[in-house]
Amino acid sequence: MQTTTPDFINCISIGRIVKTVGLKGFVKVISYSDDPDRFKNIKRVFLFNEKTQKFFKNTESFEFYPAEISYVKDSVRLKFKDHDIIEAVEGLKDALVAIPEEEKVKLPPGEFFLYEVIGYDVFDKEKYLGKVKNFSDYGGGDLFVVETESKIEVLIPARKEFIKDINTEKKLVNLDLIEGFMDL
């Protein structure tokens, strides 16, 4: 049982609570994973409030234990142990659902998590563009947030049509953008 405050730096966000569902303590979670069954094997999660930069406390610890999990269309319906009424989960809206990094899914060789690419240098046809600062998704798929040398943030679709190579050893992202993409 985690009674001391977890360190968010050592956690991975796997989803976000977007609303309550019904009156019996269920929440709707938008998953950040491309594995639809990601939540099935989770034993515990931490819930992080980005506004306050603090974890939610669950009685005497910071751990929340999934009691029921179901999948509805493009989201996860989740109920936590001992949270049986809507009032118990109303304050959790917008919380990030996080797990300790050491509990992340093991990926096959050559695959990686998007967050691992943050800080990588980005090149387009051998021309330096900047560094991956973050990722976003506005509904059309993942986007690299690349900060250029002039501190301008450029959103680049993280699609196989644009990505030539991601070299995890050299920490490089090599792109093949369409002509004019970087013209502002």
Image (cartoon, grey):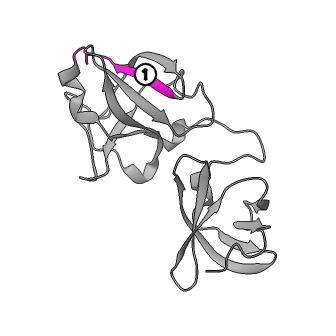
Q: 43 or 130, which lies in front?
A: 130
Residue denoted by label 1 = 77
Q: In which quarter of the image is residue 29?
A: top left
Q: Residue 72: x percent and y percent?
A: 50, 20
- Image location (x, y in percent) of residue 143: 60, 57
Residue type at mark 1?
Arg
Q: Is residue 97 left or right of residue 31?
A: left
Q: Residue at x 27, y 13 (%)?
A: 24
The residue drawn where x is 33% and y is 31% is 19
| Residues rendered magenta in the picture | 75-85
Q: Where is residue 25 in the image (x, y as percent from the top left)?
A: 28, 18
Relative to the observer, which residue lies in front, 94 or 82? 94
Q: In this view, does 55 lie above or below 118?
A: above
Q: Is residue 108 left or right of residue 151?
A: right
Total numbered labels placed on residues in the image: 1
Q: Which element carries disc 1, helix, strand or loop?
A: strand
User: What residue lies at 59% left-to-right and 48% top-to-bottom?
Assistant: 140
In the depicted structure, whether residue 71 falls above or below residue 166: above
122 lies left or right of 50: right
Residue 181's spot in the image, x, y percent? 70, 72
